[in-house]
Image: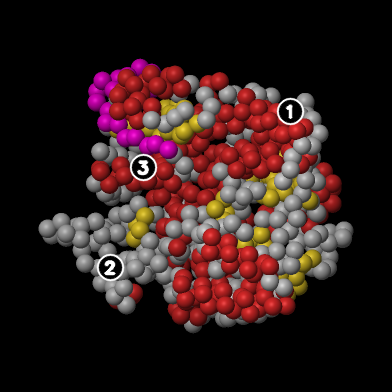
């Protein structure tokens, strides 16, 4: 239990009471693998090959795990820490250097958080790329000891391809997530090894990525439970944070207006196919005041939609902050941030109206990538190749098969997304 | 932000360590261990695939999405297969095609032993690994032979096909190739 003074996490999330540190064993993935989320989830995770070959190669559910890059990388033994520490005369210069290195490895942004006991997992299981890892041993120290040993936590999120994740609830979105997964692993593994080469400790799998990213000034916590970043909105993969004793200068939490926006917007709650995102106010959960998502229902849908997609991404795609990094997006953010807090609701309503008008209340853009086409309803396709539902000119004379567009009202630019919200509203309670 | 001269000097020194200082523990650079890692199995269910032209384009687009600056597909005749076998001395079965994924680098990786200097090689190896995994998941054979250095890579690729050498020369200042991916996936 963390009882030290509450850390500054900005306006979107506050620690208001004692926090009981969570063991990694009690987080969603290990629970799924132990069968505690039901046989359907267990079978999806452990026994069921995914339909799409590229999803199998990038993320999970393939013929075997030796084909997965991130797991192959996780099996490379940890490098020994250089006994000759590189002297750090100027922690600010070292911070800039570490950020430069992480960006060179492919990170989209870098944040350095000052440690706090509540940012660490409880004693017990440790993970290495999402798997409980016996090779590295358990977390032996208490969160307080970890915060003393590792005064800083580095977050290195990687942006997901913006165009590809417009095909949320589709294999294209899954693949964007898989590509991000490879990229974020590459950054984390190499950055940790570089810090060890400088002569300092660098531990992955012991700190909670969301807390570290928010405290490290990368973004704020949204209603959808995602860290909404300044540059990429919610469309980032946080990856694992690195706890270190390298002398650095911590960044401060930032105000992007997420607190004000999420209060009014609710686009993620409206579009979530499982009603896992609350329409209500923040609650205090385990001493933390935040919007509490129902991750169980978010997970439980997956086995039933596995023929269509694996990673939903709808709440990330729909978020008004997840926009191209352009002047008009920067301007909107600046207007919101510079408006006095009391006046922000009016600005938020205007910005949300603009977002609904120009980007749509429910993003259903048709995306084509690598032969995939999110505009074609499965079963209405001429192509029989697993994972591909594009029309490749397979008609009798080689012309493209005409696909009926009933699901998109005859419009060519609208994608097909399964399941539709109205389907799940029948059996998943709102709240 | 105004930085002092000392601060700028410290950053320059750190940048030099990053690129040029050979690591204390060779395990810092993951490529040799991953070169030796056993390859995954081929999916016994062979997927139906598109035409060779479309599959070639798919591999190139996928490679670029993963960060490749160049992905070249080379047809392998008997002579080219023999050259590959002579170089790597394993797997006598002939392959129809080779895939070469290259990454642009600012430093000559054979002269930059630091993690920063070697990172293009790590990235190029990741490309070979993921492309080979994808092909194996499609149900086709794919094996990667990794080069010991860039001279060996240039020599073999030049012997197998002049097309690849020309294409690699366009990547300046340095093109980095980790290995040669051999496959029987129908490509063009």
Between disc 1 and disc 2, the foreground one is 1
Q: Which quarter of the rendering shows the C terminus of chain A?
A: bottom right
Name the outermost residue toward the left: A397
For the magenta stretch, what is the residue range?
B69-91
| Left or right of residue A31, residue A247 in this image | right
Please give the name of the residue rendered at 41% of the width and 42% of the height, measured from the top-left corner.
B63
Give residue A48's position: percent from left, percent from top.
45, 56
Which residue is disc 2 drawn over?
A: A380
Residue A424 visible here:
yes
Residues B17 and A20: in front is B17
**Residue A227 — which label?**
none
Residues A133 and A144: in front is A144
Instruction: Pinpoint the chain carrying mark 1.
Output: A
Instruction: Tell me if residue A51 comes above or below residue A154 in the rendering.
Output: below
Residues A343 and B185: in front is A343
Instruction: Pinpoint the chain carrying mark 2.
Output: A
Please give the name of the residue rendered at 47% of the width and 28% of the height, measured from the top-left corner.
B173
Give residue A389's position: percent from left, percent from top.
31, 60
Label 3 environment density (alpha carbons within 10 Å; few <14, some 14–19, many ≥20): many
Disc 1, SS:
loop
Give residue A379's position: percent from left, percent from top.
30, 67
Name the outermost residue toward the top: B86
Which residue is disc 1 drawn over?
A: A82
Please give the name of the residue rendered at 36% of the width and 70% of the height, measured from the top-left corner.
A414
């Amino acid at each position: 239990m963390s009882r030290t003074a509450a850390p500054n996490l900005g306006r979107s999330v506050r620690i208001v009471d004692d926090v009981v540190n969570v063991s990694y064993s009690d987080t969603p993935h290990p629970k799924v693998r132990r069968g505690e989320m039901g046989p359907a989830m267990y079978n999806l995770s452990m026994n069921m090959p995914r339909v799409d070959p590229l999803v199998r190669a990038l993320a999970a559910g393939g013929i075997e795990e030796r084909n997965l890059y991130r797991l192959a990388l996780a099996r490379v033994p940890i490098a020994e820490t250089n006994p000759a520490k590189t002297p750090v005369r100027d922690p600010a210069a070292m911070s800039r250097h570490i950020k430069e290195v992480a960006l060179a490895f492919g990170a989209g942004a870098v944040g350095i958080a000052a440690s706090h006991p509540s940012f660490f997992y409880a004693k017990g299981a440790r993970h290495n790329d999402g798997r409980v890892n016996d090779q590295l041993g358990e977390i032996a120290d208490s969160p307080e000891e970890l915060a003393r040993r590792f005064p800083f936590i580095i977050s290195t999120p990687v942006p997901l391809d913006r165009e590809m994740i417009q095909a949320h609830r589709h294999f294209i979105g899954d693949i964007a997530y898989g590509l991000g997964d490879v990229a974020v692993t590459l950054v984390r593994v190499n950055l940790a090894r570089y810090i060890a080469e400088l002569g300092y400790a660098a531990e992955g799998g012991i700190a909670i990525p969301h807390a570290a990213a928010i405290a490290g000034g990368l973004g704020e916590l949204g209603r959808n439970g995602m860290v909404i970043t300044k540059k990429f909105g919610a469309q980032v993969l946080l990856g694992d944070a690195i706890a270190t004793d390298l002398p650095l200068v911590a960044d401060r939490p930032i105000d992007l207006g997420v607190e004000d926006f999420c209060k009014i917007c609710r686009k993620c709650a409206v579009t979530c196919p499982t009603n896992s995102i609350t329409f209500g106010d923040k609650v205090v959960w385990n001493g933390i005041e935040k919007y509490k998502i129902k991750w169980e229902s978010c997970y439980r849908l997956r086995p039933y939609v596995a023929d269509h997609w694996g990673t939903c991404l709808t709440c990330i795609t729909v978020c008004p902050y997840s926009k191209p990094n352009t002047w008009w997006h920067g301007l909107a953010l600046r207007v919101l941030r510079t408006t006095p807090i009391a006046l922000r609701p009016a600005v938020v309503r205007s910005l949300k109206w603009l977002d609904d008008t120009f980007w749509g209340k429910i993003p259903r853009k048709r995306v084509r990538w690598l032969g995939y086409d999110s505009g074609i309803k499965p079963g209405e396709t001429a192509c029989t190749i697993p994972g591909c539902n594009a029309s490749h000119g397979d008609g009798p004379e080689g012309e493209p098969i005409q696909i009926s567009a009933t699901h998109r009202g005859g419009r060519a630019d609208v994608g097909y997304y399964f399941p539709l919200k109205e389907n799940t509203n029948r059996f998943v309670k709102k709240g | 932000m105004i930085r002092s001269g000392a601060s700028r000097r410290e950053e320059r020194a750190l940048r030099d360590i990053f690129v040029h200082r050979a690591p204390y523990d060779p395990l810092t650079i993951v490529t040799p261990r991953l070169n030796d890692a056993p390859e995954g199995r081929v999916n016994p269910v062979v997927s139906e695939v598109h035409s060779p032209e479309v599959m070639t384009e798919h591999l190139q687009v996928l490679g670029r999405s993963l960060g490749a600056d160049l992905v070249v597909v080379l047809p392998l005749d008997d002579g080219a297969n023999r050259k590959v076998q002579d170089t790597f001395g394993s797997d006598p079965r002939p392959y129809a095609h080779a895939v070469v994924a290259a990454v642009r680098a600012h430093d000559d990786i054979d002269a930059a032993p630091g993690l920063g200097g070697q990172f293009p090689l790590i990235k190029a190896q990741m490309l070979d690994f993921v492309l080979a995994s994808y092909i194996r998941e499609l149900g086709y054979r794919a094996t990667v032979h990794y080069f010991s250095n860039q001279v060996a890579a240039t020599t073999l690729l030049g012997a197998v096909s002049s097309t690849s050498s020309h294409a690699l020369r366009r990547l300046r200042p340095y093109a980095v190739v980790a290995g040669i991916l051999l496959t029987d996936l129908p490509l063009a």
